[in-house]
Image (cartoon, rainbow, N blue to C red):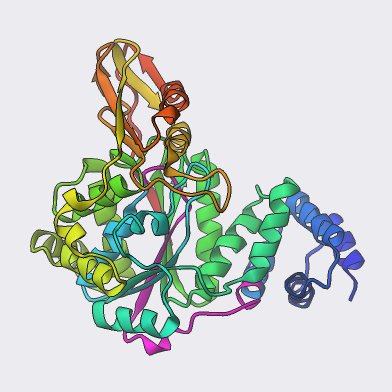
Amino acid sequence: MRMYDLILKKRNGGKLTKEEIDFFVKGVTEKTIELYHVSALMMAIYFKGMDEEETLNLTLAMADSGEKMDLKLIDGIKVDKHSTGGVGDKTTLAVIPIVAACGVKVAKMSGRGLGHTGGTIDKLESIRGFQTSVEPDKFFDIVNTHGLCVAGQSMNLAPADKELYALRDVTATVDNLSLIASSIMSKKLASGSDCILLDVKVGSGAFMKTYEDAEKLASAMVKIGNGAGRKTVAVITDMDKPLGNTVGNSIEVIEAIDTLKGKGPEDFTLLTKALSAELLRLAGIENPEEKVEEVISNGKALRKLADMVKAQGGDENYIYDTSLFEKAEFTREIKAEKDGYISHMNAETVGIASAKLGAGREKKGDSIDFTAGIKLLKKTGEKVASGETIAEMYTSDKAKFAEAERTFLSAVEYSSEEAKKFPLIYGKIK
């Protein structure tokens, strides 16, 4: 089998067989295929596309290219949740304690943030002592004992995807539906859970800017998951404005904790409850909405988060007393520039402003300021007066305020009339 023949076949619109895809992925993993051949095939796929069978075969081959999580040592049904990324998206921190409190196991591998999107691992590390590097035996023990564990991606999951993504990133072939779907789902399948919930974001702060593109991606990933024998559902949710009222690390953890106490912002609370209920429904739990309300009101979900923090070496007192979180050394109020309504608040730009304060990374290896971030006092659709405080910025380096403020203000648009409201949850695909 020759790469030249695979490239020619796909360039001409042909369909790659499972054997051809397996040969390609094996060569990528073992680095026996020249990079120019890999790039050429990626470009051919970008222009000619892949059908459902090809996309599933590519995903399965990448999932099998490295280590796979064997969750058989964990009792019961295991569920996983994946978000396609956004700004202020701290849902994992609130959803998995709720699900675990309802008796469903969550064994989750999460990543760090890069660019304008935050990472769950970075947020959790703002809790003193919390360890995100967990050995497999301990990982299984924590899930069996407490029902949940969130660890960094220490295993060599789907290494072929890592190689392909790095190449796609520099050859302008990232934006292809089959390649995006297979990249996400290969890691989810390798993670080993029985049920997968996909939170597909749409809007200015999401990878998918239009509903049509988000729906296509969601459908493709659901077909892959179900085709691989995993119960998979996707929920399409809004990311045209930041989720909740905080963007950062420690301040997002505090907001998730407040939500588990029943005191979270309306939009974040609604989405947290909806995603939690959907995961429980996937696991076969009856009356999921009622159970979600119950474990929040009786404090069981909050205790589950504290149990996980303690089991992973963190100080569980942070969960019960959020004043223990380290505070930013400097604060700046951001004022509205006009009278009227906020007609749009570009989520991606807000995320970039937060990163400029120190809450995010421009490249891997950059350090994080856990105290940095933005608290939104006004959001899209709300009426403001010129000079009114619409946000607060936090950082440990006040020299970062000027550029971050300019960036944030560029994200805010005003109008004399109330802005059109968009739904938080657009729909579900299963």
Say if 240 sits above or below 192 in the image: above
Is residue 270 toward the left or the right of residue 120 in the image? left
Q: Nearer the viewer, residue 257 or 171?
A: 257
Instruction: Please state the horizontal and vertical placement of residue 283, each as a whole percent of the image.
Output: 32, 74
Q: What is the magenta range?
A: 62-88
Q: Can you name the residue that lies furthest to the left here? A: 298
Instruction: Please state the horizontal and vertical placement of residue 180, each as a whole percent of the image.
Output: 61, 55
Say if 95 sits above or below 68 in the image: above
- Total labels drawn: 0
Q: Nearer the viewer, residue 222 or 382?
A: 382
Instruction: Please state the horizontal and vertical placement of residue 426, each as a whole percent of the image.
Output: 38, 45
Is residue 314 toward the left or the right of residue 365 in the image? left
| Residue 86 part of the magenta segment | yes
Q: Quadrant of residue 343?
A: top left
Residue under the image location 36 percent in, 14 percent down: 415
| Residue 194 part of the magenta segment | no
Say if 426 sits above or below 5 in the image: above
Is residue 321 toward the left or the right of residue 171 in the image? left
Q: Quadrant of residue 395?
A: top left
Residue under the image location 33 percent in, 10 percent down: 338
Is residue 31 toward the left or the right of residue 274 in the image? right
Q: Quadrant of the C terminus?
A: bottom left
